[in-house]
Amino acid sequence: MRFMVIVKASQDSEAGVVPSTELLTAMGKFNEQMVKAGVMLAGEGLHPTSKGARIKYSGKTPDVSHGPFPLTNDLVAGFWLIQVKSRDEAIEWMKRAPFDGGAEIEIRQIFDAEDFGEALTPELREQEERLRAQAGR
Amino acid sequence: MRFMMLMIPLGYETAPPDIQLDPERVAAMMKYNEALNDAGVLITLDGLHPPSMGARVSFAAGKPLVTDGPFAEAKEVLGGYWMIEVASRDEAIAWATKCPASENEIIEIRQVQEMTDFSEEVQQAAAGFAELQKGSGR
């Protein structure tokens, strides 16, 4: 099962404050452990929402608004993609993440083709597989 | 420049674990995904199960505190994402506006951090990150 681990934004991440060398070193070690265990598929940090945009699809034309967006518990600062056998295993890994006080992460399972049932017709499934093979440069 | 397009479907924060998708909408979205791919823009994409199947881990109390979903205080949650590579933020926005999204959906565009965005000290502390990413079996 694949999971996305969403790292929540904080005042610091939204202000563009980069983590301390100490935390980066600890995070590098944690990532290394996950890679060695074959758990980590990807991990990225996102620039603050001040450099971002939102597009809302109400009405005829999409409505674009520019960041920054109000800091809520729902804003994202970064993510990992991990592959583990269960949600519990995902939680166990993330308990070991070297975060300091205040940080919060959210663990969400990624949809696999099997999860869609009949909505994903054989044609759509074939198209999806082809896309994935071609993308990812 | 790499950007993440975060799909935020309003109401998804309270969706049941066994949510069913509309085949017509899936087909429309696949056309869009194909257009991203044909343009050489698409890096990867994924859909996320509802938060009722998820968990949150908070480090605020000094040790990890696990809460099972759904999350009462959530006003919006991620439904999925695209990772794209384009020349500018405007190009990312232009792609997002072409998405066949429904009226209750929002896409948030966020630039992905590159090592060159950081100071030399930070780059040194994160040395080996590129190798980690390469080694992480994508």
Image: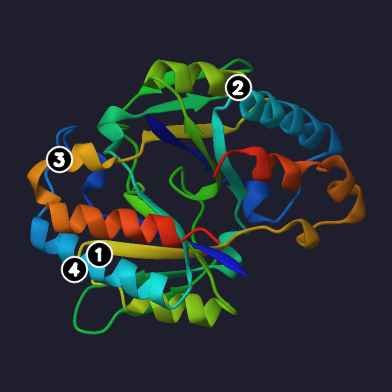
Looking at the rendered image, the disc whose residue lies closer to the viewer, 1 or 3, is 1
4 and 1 marks in contact (CB < 8 Å): yes
Q: Which residue is mark 4?
A: B28
Residue at (68%, 47%) from the top-left corner?
A12
Residue type of the residue flagged with mark 2: Ala
Image quadrant where residue A39 sits:
top right
Mark 4 Cα-neighbour bin, 10 Å: few <14, some 14–19, many ≥20: some
Q: Chain of mark 2?
A: A
Quadrant containing the C terminus of chain B in the rendered view: top right
Is label 4 on the same chain as label 3?
Answer: yes
Mark 3 Cα-neighbour bin, 10 Å: few <14, some 14–19, many ≥20: few
Q: Chain of mark 3?
A: B
N-term-proximal mark, 4 vs 3:
3
Quadrant containing the N terminus of chain B in the rendered view: bottom right
Is label 3 on the same chain as label 2?
Answer: no
Residue type of the residue flagged with mark 1: Met
Q: Chain of mark 4?
A: B
Residue at (84%, 32%) from the top-left corner?
A22
Q: Secondary structure at mark 4?
A: helix
What separation in Å lies between label 4 and label 3 (alpha carbons)?
Answer: 18 Å
Residue at (64%, 17%) from the top-left corner?
B62
Q: Position of residue B34 (x, y in %)?
A: 32, 70
Residue type of the residue flagged with mark 4: Ala
What separation in Å lies between label 1 and label 2 (alpha carbons)?
Answer: 33 Å
Q: Position of residue A119 (x, y in %)?
A: 10, 50
Instruction: Tell me, for residue A37, which label it has, or none.
Output: 2
Instruction: Tell me, for residue B19, which label it has, or none.
Output: 3
1 and 2 marks in contact (CB < 8 Å): no
4 and 3 marks in contact (CB < 8 Å): no
Is label 1 on the same chain as label 3?
Answer: yes
